[in-house]
Amino acid sequence: MADKYFSKYKTCLGYTLAGILGTIFLIAIGDLIIGKPVKLILSVTKVSCLMAFVIAPLLSWILVRIFPVYVLPEGLRSYNVFCYYSTVRWEEIAEVEPINFLGLKYVRIKSTSKKPPIWIPTWLNDNGLFLQSVARLGGKREHFEKHFNTSS
């Protein structure tokens, strides 16, 4: 039986919104510098509102749902930097290191096998329950504890 953990929706939504609005802001600034008409900037503003209030929440929800982290009796199952899922067996865990990817904090789990490291977000829905599952199913909780904030 696998325990499944999802990333926090609000964290994912915040970064998705920031990326979308930042891109649109840069487009609008570029249009102002080039001297495009105000009408174009107003249409960019409408598109940005659509993206911010419709597309970003939907995209965030989809990303949270399609990239869960699994704690299994045989090990951890998660994705790597290329969004490819693999499982690292408990006895194959060689190193658990923190990594910051575009402001989002993860732990990267390297294994003794030749597999690419898997990434686990440190902003899971319930970090305390995740750590309990790790300890219950055979992992060494102390490898992960220092990287996961359990106060929220």
Image (spheres, rainbow, N blue to C red):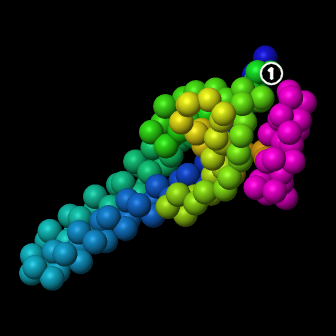
Q: Is residue 37 left or right of residue 22?
A: left
Identified by mark 1, the residue type is Pro
Q: Is residue 14 left or right of residue 30?
A: right
Rate crowding at label 1 as few (under 14), some (14 to 19) or many (20 or more) other CA atoms within 10 Å: some
Residue 9 is at least partly visible in this image: yes
Closer to us: 136 or 138 = 138
* Residue at image coords 30%, 65%: 24
- Rendered position, 20 above or below 80: below
Whether residue 33 is in magenta: the answer is: no
Q: Is residue 84 left or right of residue 119?
A: left
Q: Quadrant of residue 26?
A: bottom left
Residue 129 is at least partly visible in this image: no
* Residue at image coords 80%, 21%: 73
- Rendered position, 3 above or below 5: above
Closer to us: 82 or 56 = 82
Looking at the rendered structure, the number of numbered marks drawn on it comes to 1
User: Which type of secondary structure does the marked residue at label 1 adopt?
Assistant: loop
Q: Which residues are magenta?
A: 130-152
Closer to us: 88 or 24 = 88
Q: Position of residue 46 (x, y in %)?
A: 28, 62
Q: Position of residue 139 (x, y in %)?
A: 83, 34
Q: Position of residue 65 (x, y in %)?
A: 57, 34
Q: Which residue is mark 1?
A: 73
Q: Quadrant of the C terminus?
A: bottom right
